[in-house]
Amino acid sequence: MALASKLAQLQGKACEATRFVARHGCAYQRALVEKNKKYIVEPPTIEKCQELSKQLFYTRLASIPGRYEAFWKELDQVKQLWRIRKDLNVEHAGIAALFGIELYAWLCAGEIVGRGFTLTGYHV
């Protein structure tokens, strides 16, 4: 029974959202395009979109060596801090603890998203 009522509630909200988008979607799209006009490439054709997509892909591909170098540089800094860990103060320990907590929070958020935004478990 609970699942059926949730489904009916979800359908009602989906219909309401569809009506809202049908009424206000065009105006929102026009306002969004006008606000971000500086980012629009003329002419907005499929070919231009494909070209920009390829440029983005290969630009990101070209940035991998720089990011690789930055990763190893940061890892070397962490190794150096580990070697002189006796000289670390409370501030460094606090920053490391906050970083660990942030990583754990992102892991939890990813798990929740992966489960379909439920806190209790996976939908089976």
Image: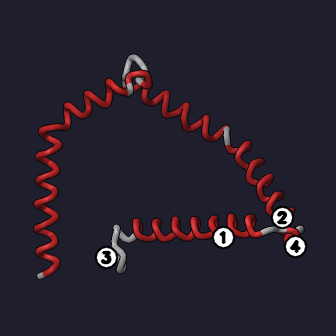
Image depth: mark 3 or mark 2 in front: 2
Q: Would you identify the image quadrant in which residue 42 lies? A: top left
Q: Provide the residue designation for mark 4.
A: 86
- Farthest residue in the top direction? 43
Q: Would you identify the image quadrant in which residue 56 lies? A: top right
The picture places residue 59, in percent across and down from the top left corner, at 61, 35
Comes first in the chain, label 4 or label 2:
2
Comes first in the chain, label 4 or label 3:
4
Residues at marks 3 and 2, CA–CA distance in whole angstroms: 44 Å
The picture places residue 51, in percent across and down from the top left corner, at 49, 27
Task: Indicate the amino acid at tag 4.
Answer: Lys
Task: Indicate the amino acid at tag 1.
Answer: Ala
Q: Provide the residue designation for mark 3.
A: 123
Residues at marks 1 and 2, CA–CA distance in whole angstroms: 15 Å
* Residue for point 13% across, 62% down: 11
The picture places residue 97, in percent across and down from the top left corner, at 66, 70
Q: Provide the residue designation for mark 2.
A: 81
Q: Would you identify the image quadrant in which residue 21 lies? A: top left
Residues at marks 4 and 3, CA–CA distance in whole angstroms: 48 Å
Residues at marks 1 and 4, CA–CA distance in whole angstroms: 17 Å
Callouts 4 and 3 close, C-beta under 8 Å: no
Comes first in the chain, label 1 or label 2:
2
Comes first in the chain, label 3 or label 2:
2
Q: Provide the residue designation for mark 1.
A: 97
Task: Indicate the amino acid at tag 3.
Answer: His
Instruction: Count residues near mark 3 (Cα–Cα under 10 Å), then give few for <14, some for 14-19, many for 20+.
Output: few
SS class, disc 4: helix
Specify whether 16 is left or right of 104.
left
